[in-house]
Amino acid sequence: MTSKSILIITAFIAVCFSLHAQDSLYNQLNEVVVTANRYEQKQNTTGKVVTVINKEIIEKSSGKTVAQLLNEQAGVVINGALNNMGSVQTVYMRGASSGRALILLDGVPVNDPSMINNEFDLNMFSLNDVERIEICRGAQSTLYGSDAVAGVINIITVKKDVTKAFNGAATVSAGNYGMLKGNTQLYGKAGKFNYTVRYARLHTNGFSSATDTITTPHRKFDSDEYDGENVNAQLSYQATPALTVKAFALYSKYQAGIDAGVFRDDEDYTIHNKSFTGGAGFTFKKNIFSINGNYQYSELNRRYLNDSLDKTNVDFENNTYGGKNQFVELFGNVALGKHFTLVAGGDYRFSSFNKLYFSISGFGPYADTFPSSSINQKSVYASVIFKGIDDRLNIELGGRINKHSIYGTNKTYTFNPSFSITDWFRIFGSISTGYKAPGIYQLFDQFSGNKNLQPETSKNYEAGVALQKEKINARAVFFNRDINNGIDYNYVTYQYFNYVRQKVDGIELEITAKPAKAVTLSANYTFISPHETSQNRKTNLDTVTYNYLLRRPAHDVNLTVGVQLAKPLYISVNGKYVSKRYDVGGYMQPDVTLKGYFLVGAYAEYKLSSQVKFFADAKNLFNTRFYDVYGYNSIPFLLNAGVTFSF
């Protein structure tokens, strides 16, 4: 561990114990979460590491995207969140590679089978759709299956505690670089029906995605525009006091300008992405048990189009990807006496993918197809949760069996104890395994596919302490993850193979405190110490163990200080420090260093009344020049201001 890490940890502990004796109404002891064990429970009754982004935080993040908000959380790096709108949003959790953090929409997995690593594009979510986000870190494959190697991010859109028949809100804002944002929502409860309808639109002229290092008076990289919209609708019906049925739909699309590559402009290259997710479900709750059923269908389309006189690589290019998912699950929980709760369920997942490619270049026309290919998975799982010693001791023990249509069967397990030493001090730990099934492209591509791929598996260890008092909520966690057969691309055989070994040790520190009546402090720090054994990226021939991970910093610090200056006026200042990282320097080139950076942002809101709020959000206040991806620009100073009306 570096001296910098030790210094930060020491400061964190000192702050915790200097504040814990103070009194305040500020208290998160009774925060209820649903992601930890798939049923509602207080956060201090689980040993899992859950971070909650609640509605209050979301409402004070009006100028941010979902990816930018997630990028401020402990253990989470969203590479691309601070780049031009429409950039690829790569989720890294606890240092794990892309596609190893599972995205959930209201508890149901969402992914894009047309992506190599089965990721989901966070550009498809509008913050307007989100009521709450729960981040559950550590291997969660026992309850959530494939891809939950480093954790899950549950984006919750369902409104609760609605009483009136008709409610609404609308926000309009504008900013530099031609940014215009607008959203509206209507929601209510009429008899046994609850409904929500939302719409959001975002446009910006943007800036050049590719970094310009050769500007001349005759040529300058053009700005890359973004235009996107989201529509979301939900309807639920309370059929009986015990039975609720629901239906939902989410449609998203955007068009964004992109460039030809690292340091290379292209004035007419665009990406057109569309996503539709819809489904239905039910919840039956009575006395000591509940049963839940869900069906979800999703369809995703990506199109890359290059079709004008600005000829870089080709004269014309049309590259279209299509993916479809179907997901069915049935799960529930039942109290087995005073001390035990059983959670059990099963699910079925079906994914398909196809691709069409056509281009015209100096070599003539070229066409290629990826014929429609599919995979399916069937799983059953169960966990037993024990509560004892006056509810101070909590233990979860669970397992999952998964059957994949190509590679066969694999298993996972979870052991997760926690113990409250006092009413305000708790210790916890876990031993768990996770897995990632190979993607359709990795299995079936005619050139690089390998049908003999096995699932990537990991073993994970956690240990931590949590301090929860009226004035402070703090947590320190040590984690270790070991992957022995990671899936990667072989530059010798030009196929995917099970080869990479990745070991990551890390520390996460989180604190939320109220040192004065009008002041709130929120901070987190993440440190990772990785060792990854893979092919030498410079020679592609020998094996090398790297002591760093591409695009993932060893040190990541986020700090926000908010002040309620008067009842209607709130302001906050936030800072983000990211240490140096490394990125690929090119094919068979040494990795390049990306310098560390420190960013400052600010937010202010003024509530004219309970129905009208004015706000302003500023990012990168000092216009710091920095890079999260080699050869691509990150955000300059950005300002967005607007007004929200509610009724």
Image: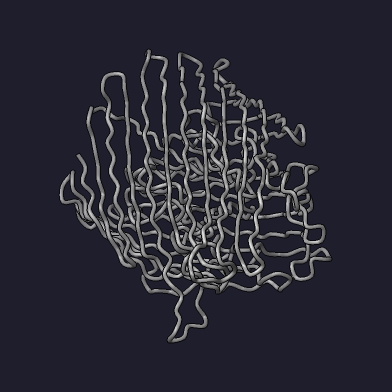
Residue at far front of view: 364
Residue sitting nearer the eye, 177 or 5: 177
Q: Quadrant of residue 244?
A: top left
Residue at far left of view: 609
Residue sitting nearer the eye, 377 or 603: 377
Residue at far right of view: 542
- Residue 604, above or below 468: below
Residue at far bottom of view: 217
Q: Is residue 608 visible?
A: yes
- For residue 45, side relative to residue 591 (left or right): left
Picture coordinates of residue 74, whole percent (x, y): 52, 53
Picture coordinates of residue 56, whole percent (x, y): 33, 45
Q: Quadrant of the N terminus?
A: bottom right
Residue, x 60% and y 56% (percent of image)?
358
Q: Quadrant of residue 401?
A: top right
- For residue 493, side relative to residue 27 (left or right): right
Residue, x 22% and y 53% (percent of image)?
643
Picture coordinates of residue 193, whole percent (x, y): 31, 22
- For residue 431, side relative to residue 621 (left or right): right
- For residue 453, side relative to residue 41 (left or right): right
Q: Quadrant of the C terminus?
A: top left
Picture coordinates of residue 264, whole percent (x, y): 55, 73
Q: How is the image coloured?
A: one colour
Residue, x 46% and y 62% (percent of image)?
257
Q: Is residue 14 visible?
A: no
Residue sitting nearer the eye, 646 or 353: 353
Give the tally of numbered discs. 0
Residue sitting nearer the eye, 598 or 208: 208
- Residue 514, above or below 329: below
